[in-house]
Each structure stands twice: as C-alpha cells, then as structure tokens.
Image: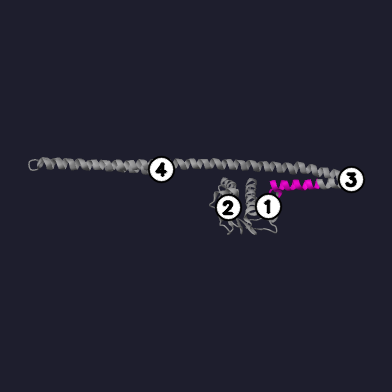
C-alpha cells in the first residue's frame, strides 16, 4: 500500500512538472510565433502546434498506461494477501480442531486409566483377597477355585497393562525422562532395538501436561517406526538447550519420500505436527527411500 501511494504521488509530481514544462514551452512557442509571425509561414506554425499536441497526447497516454499497471498491481497484491489470510485462517481452524480432539482424547484416557486403576483393579484385588482368605480358613482346594484365582489374576494384569497404555504409571510417578527410557526398553525386541540417550537427569520433572504431550508424541513416532520402517535399530536422544527441549529420533529403516502428502498423512504425522505447533515448536523430518529417517523436534520448555 505504501509503495502504491509513493508511486502514485511520484507520477502526479511528474505529471504536474510535465504540465508546467509544457505550459512554459507553450508560452515560449507563442512568443516565438508572435515574433516570427511576419517571417514564418502559416504551414510551419501549424506543424509546430501539431507537434506540441502530439507530445501532450503521448505523455498523457503514457501516464494512463502507468496508472493502469499500478492499479492492476495493487489489485493483484491485495487479492494475494486476502488469499494468504484465508489460508492462514483455515489452517488455524484445522489445527484448533485437531488439538481440541487430541486434548479431549488425552483427558478421557486419563479418566479411564484412573477409573481402571482405582476402581476395577481394586475390586478385583479385593475379590482375590476374600477368596484366598475363605479357602485358607476352610481349607478348601478345588480345580474351580484355582481357575477362578487364575482368571482374577489375569484380569488384574490385563487391566493394569491397559491402564499403563492409557497413561503410564511410570510417567506419573517418576517423570518424562524415566518413562521414555522405559518405553525404549519395552519396545525393544529381537526384531528392533531402541537405544536411549539423554543429557537430562532422569529424575527431572516438567509440567504434567507437557510430559504427557511429549510422551505420546514419542510413543506415536515409535509405533510408526515399528509398523512402517522395517528398521533394525532406532535411537532417541534428549537434551535441553537455552530453554528448548530437543528430541532427535533416528532409524535405519526403508525411509520414505517426504514430498508425498499421502505418506505423511498415512503415518499420522499431521497429528504430531499439530501437537508440536500448539507448543510453538518445530518439527523437521529428513528421509530418503532406503536411507532411513531422522526426526528432530524442538519445543520451548514450559515456565
């Protein structure tokens, strides 16, 4: 807008100065005509007047063309700004929808995990305790009672594992660094080995919401590696630098073409990007087919 105003003012000044020049030339021309009226033929005077008029018309046409292009440039620039603004608004709305869904999901996970651990597991433990007490007092042993005890123990273990998957107890009790190290150990097997390294003390704690977000981001990335990469080795490195929490994850898998939108959407990376963007962080991924994948995440630490 400033550029347009400056150019318009510049053209008006040129036009004004041009008119002054032409007025002066016109006066001089009239004086010359009057002085040379007796000596100059009428045809020569007519040619001079036509030449002056042609110059005025040419300059006027040139000014109109320049103004037309300036208006066109301003229109296109304004149109482009509106398009970018609409795109930004749509992107913000989409990110808000994704993050709202994620927040709701994580809240529900926490509620369900708490309910399973504090209520259902407690009931199963109480039922097993009463059954053991009854059999001990009455000295009763039967195949049905033994199977019932086994079923209660299996149900207890399944609910404990389910509760751990929803919200890991290690994360709640001991913090993010300890929970991520445990996540590497639990996901390592004969097919793939997850290596853990960190310059952050294991017992360091962060805000609970921050820890949960980071844990589920890393967990989802690990799931992608297990399902899609065919990697033999993966490594995660954690560190802090100037109040920035940095996560780096490498794997030696098959990799993929990052330019293909279907690939990133299929791996659920859009959801991960939305989570990171909510924390005003950055998400960079480097991958080539048959050359593995490197993911680097930087998130400002909560105050």
Which is nearer the N-term, disc 4 or disc 1?
A: 4
**Neighbours of disc 4 within 10 Å: few (<14), some (14-19), many (20+):** few
Start-end of magenta stretch: 152-172
Picture layout, residue 233 above or below residue 124: below
The residue that disc 2 covers is: 297
Measuring from the top left, give residue 113's x and y in whole percent.
Answer: 71, 44
Under circle 4, the secondary element is: helix
The answer to whether mark 3 and mark 4 are in CB contact below 8 A is no
The residue that disc 1 covers is: 179
Distance CA(mark 3)–CA(mark 4): 85 Å
Distance CA(mark 2)–CA(mark 1): 18 Å
Look at the magenta stretch and give its main secondary structure.
helix
Q: What residue do we see at 63% from left, 47% from top?
A: 213
Camera-nearest label, 3 or 4: 4
**Neighbours of disc 1 within 10 Å: few (<14), some (14-19), many (20+):** many
Which is nearer the N-term, disc 2 or disc 3?
A: 3
Dividing the picture into quarters, in which one does residue 238 lie? bottom right
Measuring from the top left, give residue 159's x and y in whole percent.
Answer: 75, 45
Camera-nearest label, 2 or 4: 4
The residue that disc 4 covers is: 77
Picture layout, residue 67 above or below residue 199: above
Q: Is residue 54 left or right of residue 4?
A: left
Q: What residue do we see at 86% from left, 47% from top?
A: 146
Camera-nearest label, 4 or 1: 4
């Amino acid at each position: 807008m400033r550029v347009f105003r400056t150019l318009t003012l510049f053209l008006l000044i040129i036009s004004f100065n041009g008119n002054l020049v032409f007025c002066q030339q016109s006066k001089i021309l009239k004086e010359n005509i009057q002085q040379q009226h007796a000596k100059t033929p009428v045809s020569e005077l007519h040619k001079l007047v036509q030449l002056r008029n042609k110059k005025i018309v040419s300059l006027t046409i040139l000014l109109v063309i320049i103004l037309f292009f300036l208006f066109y440039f301003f229109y296109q620039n304004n149109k482009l700004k509106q398009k970018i603004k609409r795109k930004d608004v749509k992107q913000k709305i989409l990110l808000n929808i994704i993050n709202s869904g994620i927040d709701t999901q994580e809240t529900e996970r926490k509620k369900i995990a708490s309910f399973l651990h504090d209520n259902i597991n407690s009931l199963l433990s109480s039922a097993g305790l009463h059954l053991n007490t009854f059999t001990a007092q009455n000295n009763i042993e039967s195949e049905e009672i033994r199977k019932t005890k086994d079923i209660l123990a299996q149900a207890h273990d399944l609910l404990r594992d389910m509760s751990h998957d929803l919200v890991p107890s290690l994360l709640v009790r001991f913090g993010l660094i300890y929970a991520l190290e445990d996540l590497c150990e639990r996901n390592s097997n004969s097919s793939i080995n997850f290596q853990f390294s960190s310059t952050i003390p294991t017992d360091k704690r962060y805000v609970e919401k921050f820890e949960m977000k980071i844990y589920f981001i890393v967990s989802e990335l690990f799931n992608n590696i297990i399902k899609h990469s065919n990697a033999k080795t993966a490594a995660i490195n954690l560190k802090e630098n100037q109040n920035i929490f940095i996560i780096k994850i490498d794997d030696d898998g098959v990799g993929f073409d990052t330019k293909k939108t279907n690939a990133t959407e299929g791996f659920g990376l859009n959801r991960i990007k939305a989570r990171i963007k909510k924390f005003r962080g950055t998400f960079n991924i480097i991958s080539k087919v048959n050359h593995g994948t490197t993911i680097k995440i930087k998130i400002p630490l909560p105050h």
